[in-house]
Amino acid sequence: MAEAVISLANLRHNARLVRKKAGVPLMAVVKANAYGHGATEVARALEEEGVSHFGVANIREALELRRGGGLEPSASVLAFSSPLPSQIPHYLEHDIEMTLCGISNLRAAEESASAAGRTIGVQLKVDTGMGRLGLPPEEALQVLCELPRCPHVELRGIYTHFADSTGERAFTRRQLEAFTAFCREYEHASGRTVLKHAANSGAILSEPGATLDMVRPGILLYGARPSAESEETLGLRPVMQLEARVVFLKTVRAGTTISYGRTWSAPGTRRIATIAAGYADGYHRALSGRGTVAINGRPYPQVGTVTMDQIMVDLGEESDVRIGDRAVLFGAGGMSVDQLADRAGTISYELLCAVSGRVKRVFR
């Protein structure tokens, strides 16, 4: 019975603010179902704001976005993961840009594209310090030297990823220097310019020199902070509000324990509300006894262990809360997702992505 209410107006507002801050086009990061917000609907709304580049995690997400309808055929969709050779035909069929990570997948891309009589668009991933995908600059340059022998592969961009854009700025700057030096060397040697991008949400706020030709905002679009250390918020608005209904009310005596493990007992006579959302909906078990839930505009403490399908809240000795009332677990009118993440000992990204598929998305 939980619902995630998605404000597309707030999403558009955030996109405008981020674009103004960066001063360059956006590649909207809509992986993980747009951080739980609904990738197809989010991408359509952002396209109406002039966004024409989208980033997803893998080919499956890319296909879902293409097949979801609504995007212009000219919209660019980049899959960030390194593909298996067997997946490359899907990139070709649906015009998905492939992340190029080495000689082997360059050759696999050329082989598949040649066999299909088509050209595949790729973007080269350079590892400047993230240590995840991509090659270090000296090896990445060898891949680019191989490109002229692959006539069915079209280089559409070069990118890197910052490892600590909200923390140690000196390391981010070293990454940026290594990346820009690599791009200058390639562009000078090849006599061509290429689309370059590096800045994620954290770098958009903290490293103006990292904006380059395009930026890749994710969490900023959804109205949350890249980290607890992020001081600038740009006037962002939360896009998701997680709600559920009060489904049961009861009065308990002093000493009555609530939920698994009996971790909370009533200090006196209390009204207890049971709300139809739990960790299977995305309200983490780590929040047990740490969060507050807003009902009719008033905050109430969540008590006892969070269960799979329900949570309980302490309404005090008396309350006008009724069965069917709406409870805001996070979002406008309740705790922000950033505040809740702090209490859970995690980040807002995880809480947003954790809102499960059984939670209905309501777009407004």
Image (tube, helix red, strand yellow):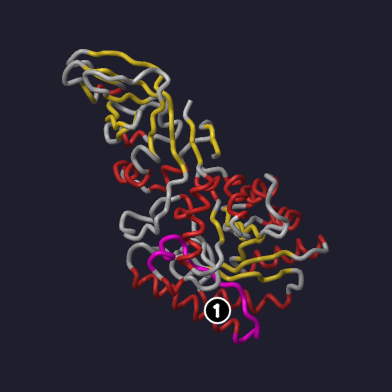
Residue drawn at x 33%, y 40% as measured from the top left: 335
Residue 115's quadrant in the figure?
A: bottom right
Q: Nearer the viewer, residue 300 or 68?
A: 300
Up-down relation of residue 261 to residue 131 (above or below):
above
Secondary structure of the residue carrying tag 1 is: helix
Quadrant (top left/top right/bottom left/bottom right) for the C terminus:
top right
Where is residue 205? Give x, y as percent.
Answer: 40, 64
Up-down relation of residue 32 to residue 168 (above or below):
above
Residue drawn at x 27%, y 35% as measured from the top left: 290
Queried whether the magenta region covers residue 199, the answer comes back as yes
Where is residue 293? Give x, y as percent.
Answer: 33, 32
Residue drawn at x 43%, y 68% as measured from the top left: 129
Neighbor class of circle 1 (other Cα within 10 Å; few <14, some 14-19, many 20+) is many
Identified by mark 1, the residue type is Cys
53 relative to 136 in the view: left or right: right
86 relative to 218 in the view: left or right: right
Where is residue 338? Give x, y as percent.
Answer: 35, 47
Where is residue 249? Give x, y as percent.
Answer: 34, 16
Q: Which residue is mark 1?
A: 183
- Read off the magenta span: 188-206
Queried whether the magenta region covers residue 353, the answer comes back as no
Q: Nearer the viewer, residue 249 or 258?
A: 249
Up-down relation of residue 247 to residue 142 (above or below):
above
| Total labels drawn | 1
